[in-house]
Amino acid sequence: MNHFFPALAWISLLLAPPAQMQARPDVPDSLKAPAGDEVILVGHATGSQIYVCQAGADQKISWTLKGPEADLVDAQGKKIIHHFAGPTWKHNDGSEVTGRVVAKQDAPKPDAVAWLLLTAATHTGSGILSRVTTIQRIHTEGGLPPNATSCTAAATGTESKSAYSADYYFYAPAK
């Protein structure tokens, strides 16, 4: 039996170049992640933005965002993250991050929800999302609330789902 091969394989792994780092997307300055952060994960989301017809603080009835309900897939199309109200992202490895919006920019497409820059507010678990400090939502399609005239006193409490898609970039401090 040749014990030399496993040693060569191990050495070649150690000498192999590091995995190619994800490039930062081209976004407006207000949506750029901090300079010391690097992209550690990218996912493409498809799902819904869920709205509720309800009275706001001003007592006017309007469609209010309840939260997203979407799945994110990697470049190979494998589901990696579930995204839901919070806004929260839960990775298949059990780690979660909840974000807080720090900047917003109208989407280039007039029928799409805004592009966002979020900062991590809380973490759960010890997987990949436990390191995340910044999240971008870009390349959005759809997801806008229903027509304002459809939210009436009679419709109060009803929900409406608007299909959307987006790309999410997750950042962590460079190692």
Image: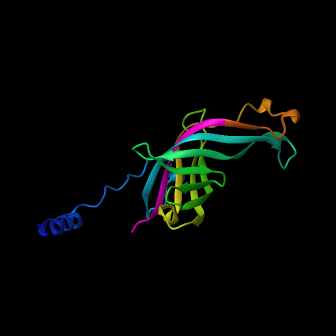
Residue 26 in percent (x, y) is at 44, 47
Residue at figure coordinates x 52%, y 45% from the top left: 138
Q: Is residue 170 magenta?
A: yes
Residue at the farthest front position: 1
Quadrant in the rendering for residue 71: top right
The magenta stretch spans which residues? 162-175
Residue at figure coordinates x 60%, y 49% from the top left: 104
Residue at figure coordinates x 43%, y 48% from the top left: 25
Q: Quadrant of the C terminus?
A: bottom left
Query: Which of 157 and 116 lies nearest the eye of the viewer?
Result: 157
Q: Is residue 69 left or right of residue 3?
A: right
Residue 74 in percent (x, y) is at 44, 47
Query: Which of 60 and 64 lies nearest the eye of the viewer?
Result: 64
Residue at figure coordinates x 35%, y 56% from the top left: 21
Q: Quadrant of the N terminus?
A: bottom left
Q: Is residue 148 above or below residue 27?
A: above
Residue 11 in percent (x, y) is at 19, 68
